[in-house]
Image (spheres, rainbow, N blue to C red):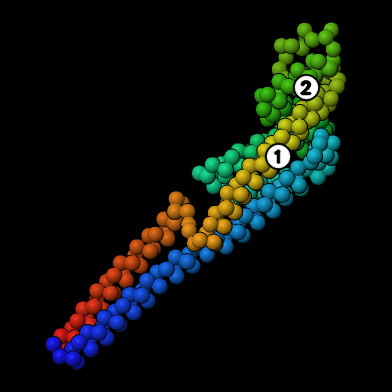
């Protein structure tokens, strides 16, 4: 083997090492860019979730008086509350333990808020625009439908409270009446007081649910922030998720292409050396 061939082989090997190093650098840079992109998105998501949860909670009245005042702006409140709830719901993953817990908290709050609104409508039934033009019997049928939209537990509570409020002497004649018939009975007073008791009950339960929501949100945000710190400080990524699976699929195709390219390059160099 002549000196010229040895020199060519050296040049070829050096070139090949340079190419392989270049290919490795590209792959490593792709992984780094992927992790940086996901980390930045996670930081943005943390900030948005914190703000959206805060906005959602700020919409909820703090007590029964606040809920009762909603009657005058009920439609506006419902629209804002539903929109806020939906935005948070779309941000959460029900397959994640903390995400699923938050979704459960949101559902509890949502159901109780709308149960309160139904009780408020019942209290102010005669003021509802859609029922003002109805006749006596049509109005009673509409009121029955409104009552039956309440959960069975709420109907039972209303019935129990009405019977308790009107006194023990009249209890027997009302015990076997359905809640809706009892409530629409014109001979029975203090029905608004029973609705207020239900509203107060749900309002206190919502306070507890909101506290749970905040606590569980803090746990989720802490978990996500810990992931951000790991990803940004030591470049590691949680491989047990869908985003990583997508990246790995793309990466495998990339590696196959690089391997084929490297083999072709080696063959070309060998052919040059042999020639």
Crowding near the residue tagged with mark 1, few <14, some 14–19, many ≥20 C-alpha atoms within 10 Å: some
Q: Is residue 75 above or below residue 180?
A: below
Q: Residue at x 24, y 74 (%)?
A: 263
Q: Secondary structure at mark 2?
A: helix
Question: 198 or 119: nearer the eye?
Answer: 198
Q: CA distance from mark 2 to mark 1?
A: 31 Å
Q: Tell me if residue 74 can be seen.
A: yes
Q: Is residue 266 above or below residue 127?
A: below
Residue linked to disc 2: 183
Q: Position of residue 89 (x, y in %)?
A: 60, 47
Number of callouts: 2
Crowding near the residue tagged with mark 2, few <14, some 14–19, many ≥20 C-alpha atoms within 10 Å: many
Q: Is residue 101 left or right of residue 84?
A: left
Q: Residue at x 61, y 49 (%)?
A: 222
Quadrant of the drawing holding the N terminus: bottom left
Q: Position of residue 185 (x, y in %)?
A: 80, 19
What is the number of the mark on residue 210? 1
Q: Is residue 110 left or right of residue 25?
A: right
Q: Is residue 239 left or right of residue 53?
A: left
Which of the two marks, 2 or 1, is nearer to us in this view?
1
Quadrant of the drawing holding the C terminus: bottom left
Q: Position of residue 207 (x, y in %)?
A: 74, 36
Q: Residue at x 68, y 24 (%)?
A: 153
């Amino acid at each position: 083997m002549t000196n010229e061939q040895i020199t060519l082989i050296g040049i070829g090997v050096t070139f090949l090492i340079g190419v392989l190093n270049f290919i490795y650098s590209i792959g490593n840079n792709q992984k780094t860019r992927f992790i940086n992109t996901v980390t930045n998105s996670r930081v943005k998501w943390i900030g948005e979730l914190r703000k959206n949860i805060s906005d959602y909670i700020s919409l909820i009245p703090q007590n029964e008086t606040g809920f009762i005042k909603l009657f005058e702006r009920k439609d506006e409140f419902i629209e804002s509350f539903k929109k806020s709830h939906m935005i948070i719901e779309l941000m959460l993953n029900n397959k994640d333990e903390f995400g699923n817990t938050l979704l459960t908290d949101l559902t509890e709050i949502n159901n109780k808020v709308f149960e309160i609104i139904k009780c408020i409508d019942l209290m102010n039934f005669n003021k509802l625009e859609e029922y003002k033009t109805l006749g006596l019997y049509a109005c009673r049928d509409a009121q029955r439908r409104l009552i039956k939209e309440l959960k069975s537990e709420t109907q039972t509570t209303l019935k129990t409270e009405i019977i308790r409020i009107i006194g023990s002497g009249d209890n027997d004649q009302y015990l076997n009446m359905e809640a809706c018939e009892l409530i629409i009975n014109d001979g029975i007073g203090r029905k608004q007081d029973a609705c207020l008791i239900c509203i107060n009950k749900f309002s206190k339960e919502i306070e507890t649910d909101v506290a749970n929501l905040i606590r569980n949100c803090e746990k989720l945000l802490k978990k996500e922030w810990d992931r951000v710190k790991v990803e940004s400080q030591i470049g590691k990524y949680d491989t047990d998720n869908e985003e990583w699976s997508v990246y790995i699929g793309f990466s495998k195709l990339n590696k196959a292409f690089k391997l084929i390219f490297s083999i072709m390059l080696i063959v070309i160099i060998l052919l040059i050396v042999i020639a």
